[in-house]
Amino acid sequence: MKMVINGEWVGSLSDRTYTVKNPANGEAVGPVPLGVRDDVKRAADAAEEALSRWSGTSSHHRGQILARAAARIREQAEEIAIILTAEQGKPQREAIDEVRGSARVFEYYAGLSSNPLATIQRLEDGSEATVLREPIGVCGAILPWNMPALLMAWKVGPALLTGNTVVLKPATATPLTPLMMAAALHDAGLPNGVLNVVTGSGDEVGEEIVRSKQIRKVSFTGSTQTGKRIMTLAAHDLKRLTLELGGSDPMIICGDADIPKAVAGAVAGRFYNAGQICTAVKRLYVVDAVADQVIEQITEKVGQITVGDGMKPEVKMGPLSSMQGRESIRSVVRQVVDREEGRVIAGGELPQGDEYLRGNFYTPTLVTDVAPDSVLLREEIFGPVLPIVRVKDLNEAITAANSTRYGLGASVWTSDPKTIRVAVGGLKAGIVWVNQHLKIPPEVPFGGVKESGVGRENGMQSLDAYTEAKTVLVRL
Ligand code: NAD
């Protein structure tokens, strides 16, 4: 597939391509252009050129295009999901959920198109104050590889609705899904130049998006390390930033929780997308009184997860996205065992059998008796490994849950309203779930505190994030 600049499907000025590989078997999924800095320049030129026409249309018109794009994505959901599984590895069921979820996001923004953004008020001295919300201009969007369809919609939906134009860079590993989504948006009537997609590396294409003087805002989702680099680069022209970064979400199971539901929540929360989700359950804290029960039930459930190629209907967990990712998980688990930082009670090895030889597979892994300073509790582990920690009570759980540099999500599982209040007040996170984990509806703001990010996506807040306030004071 080619990339899209000014509504045309083009190769890179480098004339080079690279091959996207299927993480389940190493086979080629397809070639895409290896973009270079000058490709970002021509994408930014196209976006700049399209800006005044696009921002001059009504938000109703822009919303209608988003609604038609959503319908198109729904029609093509199965086709897009096949490509998503082929380039990313997730099981088909999860891929279809993600693609439909991205359509749902565009529908949400289409629905906001008749909401007035400006406010007017009369001041003490008789002046009339109008606060307009104007588009920022050309916006950069940089995506990770774990949820390419959904995260594209989180950025492109509000950016386009509010009249901005976009230069988007998909992750190197997963460019095809965003390119198919871009095609759906163009089929829905998006004018040329409003959304441009440049494929290529983070070092070249990503950095150029952040450095470009034509691009006034960057919305980035990815690791905390890259987020810090982007923040440094963005300082040179004070670019507006939204940074959605890494997480190490804690889940707390209290003594009065519905244990089977909590166990199901922990397993889905950790092993969905092979554990490669920013808000995956990355640390499980269980109150002593129910810990044995929880560990027994989780072990049983994890033993039932079928690992394999996501195209097979029986598969519940696909491969990791990259061999490097798989090897990093493998080495973390080895370190835990070698340094006696925990006891592996399930998984902790490569799955056996010919079907696994060519893919980046790892077995779902549970670790108990985890040392308080273990890497499993300190760092974001982006794969299917769940450390389980026993705690005396809720207070100890909250203190442990907060003892990380991350603060994306957190969940508490309990049936007691007072416990809910204490946990919600005590947990340092951008989102706190009660008796659930993972769900991120487009209607509510999402983002992290501490090193999990800056700003929020989704909800009405995302409209603020893609506009600048202009205050007009009129004395009549
Ligand atoms: P990553 O930081 O390696 O890459 C993300 C994107 O940034 C890719 O497109 C990459 O090519 C690009 N990039 C890399 N270096 C760059 C640079 N110097 N300048 C500009 N762009 C650059 O992250 P990843 O491995 O793709 O994704 C996994 C990470 O993303 C995890 O830490 C995960 O928690 C996080 N994540 C966060 C959220 C959230 O909403 N908070 C959602 C999904 C994933």
Image (cartoon, rainbow, N blue to C red):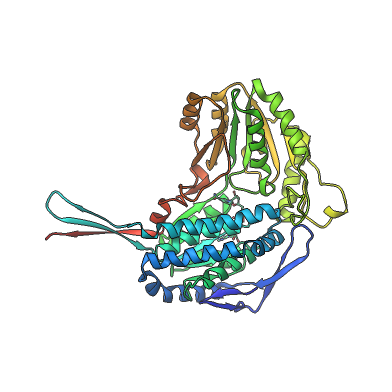
Q: Is residue 444 above or below residue 161?
A: above
Q: The N terminus lies in which quarter of the figure?
A: bottom right
x and y percentages locating residue 356 in the rendered image: 83, 53
Q: Quadrant of ligand 1?
A: bottom right
x and y percentages locating residue 204 in the rendered image: 58, 67
Residue at 73% across / 47% down in the picture? 316
Q: How many marks?
A: 0
Q: Is residue 366 above or below residue 60?
A: above
Foreground residue among 48 and 405? 48
Residue at 68% across / 52% down in the picture? 93
Q: Is residue 363 above or below residue 71?
A: above
Q: In terms of image quadrants, where is residue 286? A: top right
x and y percentages locating residue 383 in the rendered image: 69, 46
- Residue lying furthest right: 354
Q: 380 left or right of 422?
A: right
Q: In terms of image quadrants, where is residue 467? A: bottom left
* Residue 143 seen in the figure: yes
* Residue 233 seen in the figure: no
Q: The C terminus lies in which quarter of the figure?
A: bottom left
x and y percentages locating residue 236 in the rendered image: 43, 61
Residue at 74% across / 28% down in the picture? 296
Q: In terms of image quadrants, where is residue 339? A: top right
